[in-house]
Image: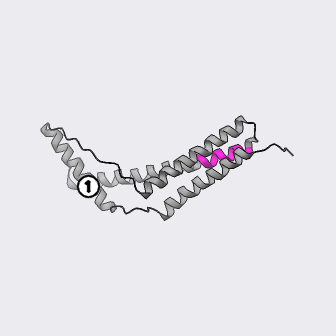
């Protein structure tokens, strides 16, 4: 049995596990901040696209500046990404310090899984919004 210490890699496993659990809890129990309904978001996007199209056809340039809202969901997503990244960095440090690859690999897998889960959920949500906006625009006769 190998009696080398794997402290950094085990710390990476712990951080990666927390990141993945945070991503899963945020997906299943969230959103934690009040959000507008899907119908309201789709209607606002459809109106915005229509107004921008009309303004572009008239030769007007419309600039819109929206301020970034930092809510609970944004903080949870940021914390998940940071913890996932830290798990991957700790895994790389573990490999560099010649800790067992199996332990360091577990830390890397948990960190990457937490980050990838967030991207997969975001991509799915964006796909749904695009389909709904195009359906609304088609029903309005714009598309």
Question: Residue placed at 87% from the left, 46% from the top?
Answer: 1
Q: Main secondary structure of the magenta part?
A: helix
Helix, strand or loop for disc 1: helix
Question: Residue placed at 66% from the left, 38% from the top?
Answer: 92
Measuring from the top left, give residue 16's x and y in whole percent.
Answer: 62, 50
Above or below, comparing residue 57 to residue 140 in the picture: above
* 138 or 51: nearer the viewer: 51
Q: Is residue 57 magenta?
A: no
Magenta residues? 102-111
In the image, is 72 to the left or to the right of 13?
left
Measuring from the top left, give residue 52's x and y in whole percent.
Answer: 20, 44
Measuring from the top left, give residue 7's x and y in whole percent.
Answer: 73, 46
- The single residue placed furthest to the left in the displayed view is 58
* 28 or 129: nearer the viewer: 28
Which residue matches tag 1? 44
Above or below, comparing residue 22 to residue 93 in the picture: below
Measuring from the top left, give residue 45's x and y in whole percent.
Answer: 27, 52
């Amino acid at each position: 049995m190998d009696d080398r210490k794997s402290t950094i890699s085990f710390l990476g496993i712990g951080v990666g596990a927390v990141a993945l659990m945070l991503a899963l809890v945020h997906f299943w129990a969230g959103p934690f901040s009040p959000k507008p309904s899907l119908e309201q978001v789709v209607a606002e996007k459809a109106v915005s696209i229509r107004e921008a199209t009309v303004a572009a056809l008239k030769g007007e340039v419309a600039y819109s500046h929206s301020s970034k809202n930092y809510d609970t969901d944004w903080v949870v997503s940021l914390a998940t990404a940071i913890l996932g990244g830290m798990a991957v960095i700790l895994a790389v440090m573990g490999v560099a310090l010649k800790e067992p690859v199996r332990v360091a690999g577990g830390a890397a897998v948990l960190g990457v899984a937490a980050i990838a889960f967030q991207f997969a959920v975001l991509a799915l949500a964006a796909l749904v919004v695009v389909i709904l906006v195009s359906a609304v625009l088609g029903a309005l006769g714009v598309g």
